[in-house]
């Protein structure tokens, strides 16, 4: 009997010891799993990594061309034409924008003279910082950049190519096997800050504060979006905001996102300082939509194109507290016709590049690609 009690006591003590050892392990595993899950969720709702690399700015734009191709949305666009300069760029670098570019993120820097504490400094026109991600032929691109650059700076083990274009200096840095940074901001520190961020571990908490504040309002699954400040009433604002003053009584932040589900679904939200401002924007936008519908009803007897009709009928404006929200659905046919009827060719354009002596060639040909996706505007 005593033997049995001895064995039972030993067994109980052994189980208690085993439990004490097992619980911390289980707790640690659960803690790690929770941390990983939280990190995944945060990254899912964080801005894309190319956008998080950008410096502080007054506006941000992003497009995921990889998803555009996956969803076959690009089939609605006409083929891209190649002018001689762009074809030369393709041959020298092996990079074709419409084929090899996967993601593009842009930061827009307003001149300080526009008011509203613009991040563009003393520049008289907006400046841009850009991140391109795609299938890059590293050696070919580096050789091309070295040929057209006036000088090359070394920073944090990275070459920064200084390329003179139209009286400005465009700085280009190859950040990795798939990533390139470009900036035509007057301050060279901006592209250096991009290089610094690219060397750190990707964090879902990273990125400019203005971008992080409003990115949560971008529609989930968007293939493209924009977050920009609108400052129509600020003294010194240029004509670029002149048209906005019709809709916006005071400065606001506009978040536009686009999702492609058989059609392009657009959502634009204007974040204002008060419900009264949002009401004013909503009422003015509603008036404009009424005018559009009235114009639609006064067309010729041939009727309205069904894709155009679908687009205008889908336009909706509503107020949500201090926000004015516009939604629209753009059919694939409307997109195809809009580009097909555009007076501008859907092809990259090439800005004139100064030679290393600082002069701009007289010929129309130049050494850099000019593209709507290309850097310096």
Image (cartoon, rainbow, N blue to C red):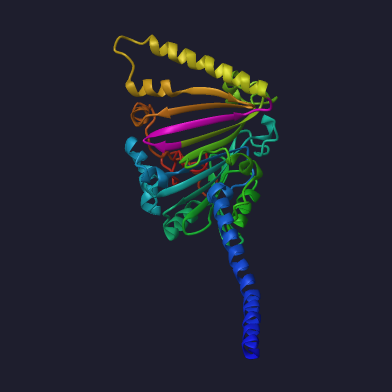
Q: Nearer the viewer, residue 95 or 13?
A: 13
Q: Which residue lies furthest to the front in this view?
A: 1
Q: Check the image and report above or below for 188 versus 215.
A: below
Residue at (65, 26) in percent of width and height: 237
Going by the image, does 273 lie left or right of 282?
A: right
Across and down, in percent, residue 148 comes to 48, 51
Going by the image, does 241 lie left or right of 78?
A: right
Quadrant housing residue 151: bottom right
Across and down, in percent, residue 36 comes to 57, 59
Q: Check the image and report above or below for 47 versus 31.
A: above
Q: Nearer the viewer, residue 359 or 168?
A: 168
- Judge whether residue 25 can be spotted in this image: yes
Residue at (46, 56) in percent of width and height: 178
The magenta region covers 259-274
Across and down, in percent, residue 51 comes to 55, 47
Going by the image, does 177 lie left or right of 30?
A: left
- Judge whether residue 201 can be spotted in this image: no
Q: Is the magenta stretch mostly helix, strand or loop?
A: strand
């Amino acid at each position: 009997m005593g033997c049995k009690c001895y064995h039972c006591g030993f067994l109980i003590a052994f189980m208690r010891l085993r439990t004490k050892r097992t619980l911390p392990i289980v707790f640690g595993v659960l803690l790690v799993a929770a941390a990983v899950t939280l990190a995944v969720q945060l990254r899912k709702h964080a801005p894309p990594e190319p956008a998080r690399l950008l410096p502080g700015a007054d506006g941000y734009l992003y497009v995921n061309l990889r998803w555009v191709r996956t969803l076959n949305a690009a089939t609605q666009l006409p083929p891209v034409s190649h002018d001689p300069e762009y074809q030369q760029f393709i041959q020298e670098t092996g990079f074709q924008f419409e084929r090899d570019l996967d993601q593009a993120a842009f930061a827009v820097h307003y001149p300080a003279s526009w008011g509203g504490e613009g991040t563009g400094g003393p520049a008289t026109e907006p400046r841009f910082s850009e991140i391109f991600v795609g299938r890059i032929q590293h050696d070919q691109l580096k050789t091309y950049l070295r040929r057209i650059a006036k000088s090359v700076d070394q920073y944090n083990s990275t070459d920064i190519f200084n390329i003179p274009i139209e009286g400005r200096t465009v700085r280009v840095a190859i950040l990795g096997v798939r990533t390139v940074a470009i900036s035509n901001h007057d301050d060279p520190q901006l592209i250096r800050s991009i290089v610094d961020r690219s060397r750190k571990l990707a964090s879902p908490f990273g990125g400019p504060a203005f971008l992080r504040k409003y990115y949560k309002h971008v529609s989930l699954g968007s293939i493209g979006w924009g977050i920009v400040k609108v400052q129509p009433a600020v003294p010194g604002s240029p004509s670029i905001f002149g048209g906005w003053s019709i809709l916006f009584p005071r400065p606001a932040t506009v978040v536009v996102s686009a999702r492609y589900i058989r059609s392009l679904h657009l959502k634009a939200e204007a974040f204002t300082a008060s419900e009264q401002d949002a009401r004013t924007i909503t009422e003015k936008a509603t008036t404009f939509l009424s005018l559009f519908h009235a114009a639609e009803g006064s067309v010729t007897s041939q009727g309205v194109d069904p894709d155009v009709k679908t687009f205008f009928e889908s336009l909706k404006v509503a107020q949500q507290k201090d926000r004015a929200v516009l939604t629209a659905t753009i059919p694939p046919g409307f997109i195809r016709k809009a580009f097909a009827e555009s007076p501008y060719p859907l092809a990259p354009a090439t800005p004139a590049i100064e030679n290393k002596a600082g002069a701009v060639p007289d010929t129309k040909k130049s050494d850099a690609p000019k593209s709507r996706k290309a850097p310096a505007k």
